[in-house]
């Protein structure tokens, strides 16, 4: 049998053996890990360049990208509902709906941001009612 790392012939101790020694096994694993890591480094460098150019404004995003409407997200819907709520009862209903919505429908920390916005809006409504 041939070692996957050094291609030398070896007598396997087990039927599933792929390497002639622990040193070759580790070396092969590290080589694969370094290759994957370097691919991610290249991708990250390219993304940094693209983001830097877009942030600096020296190159505008393609017009075809700008013409697409923004997708309506669960987060966006809740933010609109929170902003449009004018009474405590309306806002409490929005909060109950928010809590009942599965969290996987939100990206990242958007669920927490929406809930925090609802709490801030509730404080604002309660403050206006006291006046």
Image (tube, helix red, strand yellow):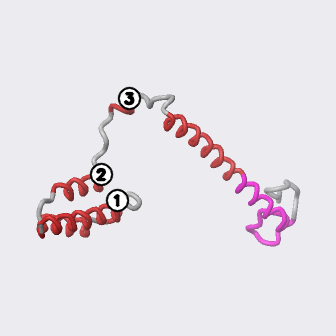
Q: Is residue 85 left or right of residue 103?
A: left
Residue under the image location 19 percent in, 56 percent down = 81
> How much space separates mark 2 and mark 1, taking CA atoms?
8 Å
Mark number for residue 64? 3
Residue under the image location 49 percent in, 35 percent down = 54
Using the image as rendered, state which of residue 5 and residue 125 is in the foreground: 125
> How much space separates mark 2 and mark 3, taking CA atoms?
21 Å
Kindly indicate whether the residue at mark 1 contacts the one at mark 2 (C-beta within 8 angstroms): yes
Q: Residue furthest front?
A: 131
Q: Is residue 59 left or right of residue 108?
A: right
Q: Image height check: is 113 above or below 13?
A: above
Q: Which residues are magenta?
A: 11-34
Residue 96, how many percent across, how many down?
A: 20, 69
Q: Quickly name the residue at label 1.
A: 106
Kindly indicate whether the residue at mark 3 contacts the one at mark 2 (C-beta within 8 angstroms): no
Q: Crowding at label 1, few (<14), some or many (≥20) Cα neighbours within 10 Å?
A: some
Residue 50, how many percent across, how many down?
A: 54, 37
Of the numbered discs 2 and 3, the one sitting upstream in the chain is: 3
Q: Secondary structure at mark 3?
A: helix
Q: Quadrant of the C terminus?
A: bottom left
Of the numbered discs 2 and 1, the one sitting upstream in the chain is: 2
Q: Residue furthest bottom?
A: 13
Q: Secondary structure at mark 1?
A: loop
Q: Quadrant of the N terminus?
A: bottom right
Q: Image height check: is 44 above or below 89?
A: above
Tell me if residue 31 is in the magenta stretch.
Answer: yes
Of the numbered discs 1 and 3, the one sitting upstream in the chain is: 3
Q: Quickly name the residue at label 2.
A: 73
Q: Is residue 5 left or right of residue 119?
A: right
Residue 69, how many percent across, how many down?
A: 30, 37
């Amino acid at each position: 049998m041939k070692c996957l790392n050094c291609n030398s012939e070896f007598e396997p101790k087990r039927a599933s053996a792929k390497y002639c020694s622990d040193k070759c096994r580790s070396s092969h694993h590290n080589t694969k890990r370094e290759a994957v890591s370097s691919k991610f480094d290249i991708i990250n460098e390219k993304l940094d360049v693209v983001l830097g150019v877009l942030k600096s404004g020296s190159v505008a995003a393609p017009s075809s990208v700008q013409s697409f409407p923004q997708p309506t997200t669960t987060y966006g819907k809740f933010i609109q509902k929170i902003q449009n709520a004018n009474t405590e009862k309306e806002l409490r209903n929005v909060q109950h709906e928010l809590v009942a919505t599965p969290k996987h429908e939100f990206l990242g920390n958007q669920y927490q941001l929406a809930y925090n916005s609802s709490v801030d809006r509730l404080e604002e409504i309660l403050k206006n009612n006291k006046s």
